[in-house]
Amino acid sequence: MIRSILYATDLGLYAPYVLQHALAMARSFKARLHVVHVVEPMGLFAESVLQTYVDETRLKELRSTGLETVMSNIELRVLEGFRDELGDNPEDLELIGSVSVLRGDPPISILEHAQKLAVDLLVVGSHSHGAALEVPVGRTASRLLQLCDVPVYLVPMLQHRSRHE
């Protein structure tokens, strides 16, 4: 029995397409839909560029309050995207149990969040908007398929491919 679903989104170009799959599953099972987006930590290059242009005090401030502001803005963007996407079906908003924006390594953070929520199904796109076309499954989706304790509903990004493939 599927009572709760976790939809992991990269907020990319195909996120609305994957969201439609997650909502369809939630509707059909009358399940609670939880949404998660994971922000990766800043890389060494970005950190060194910031250190070049920003003094230490401002850098500390950016690390604490700046990142929290960005995280809150992402969460608002996710909710606004849902409202836009669900326009004619506002009752679908009632299916959404939570929206979380986390920091960390995406596959690990998604798995930990799925465990914390004790979800029965994970919904994810096959790869990010930035993935090469010849890569059938992206890094995050691949790790989730390998490590997840619950079934994974993988939405393929077939829009990329020509009809001959």
Image: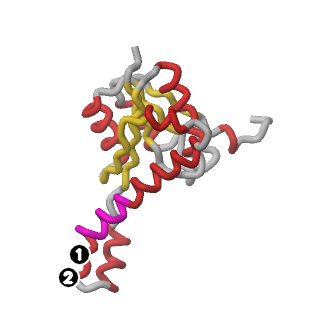
Nearest the eye: 93 or 64 = 93
Say if mark 1 contacts mark 2, CB within 8 Å: yes
> Where does label 1 land, which residue?
61
Q: Quadrant of the N terminus?
A: top left
What residue is drawn where x is 30% and y is 70%? 66
Instruction: Name the image quarter holding the C terminus.
Output: top right
At x 34%, y 46%, the residue is: 100
Magenta segment, which residues?
Answer: 64-72
The residue tagged 2 is 57
Q: Residue furthest top?
A: 1
Q: Nearer the viewer, residue 41 or 75?
A: 75
Say what secondary structure mark 2 lies in. Answer: helix
**Residue 40 part of the magenta-drawn span:** no
Image quadrant assignment for residue 61 = bottom left
In percent of width and height, residue 157 lies at 62, 39
Residue shown at the point (28%, 32%) measured from the top left: 117
Q: Residue at x 46, y 55 (%)?
A: 77
- Distance CA(mark 1)–CA(mark 2): 6 Å
Amino acid at circle 1: Glu
The three-letter code of the residue at mark 2 reads: Thr
Can residue 86 be seen here? The reply is yes
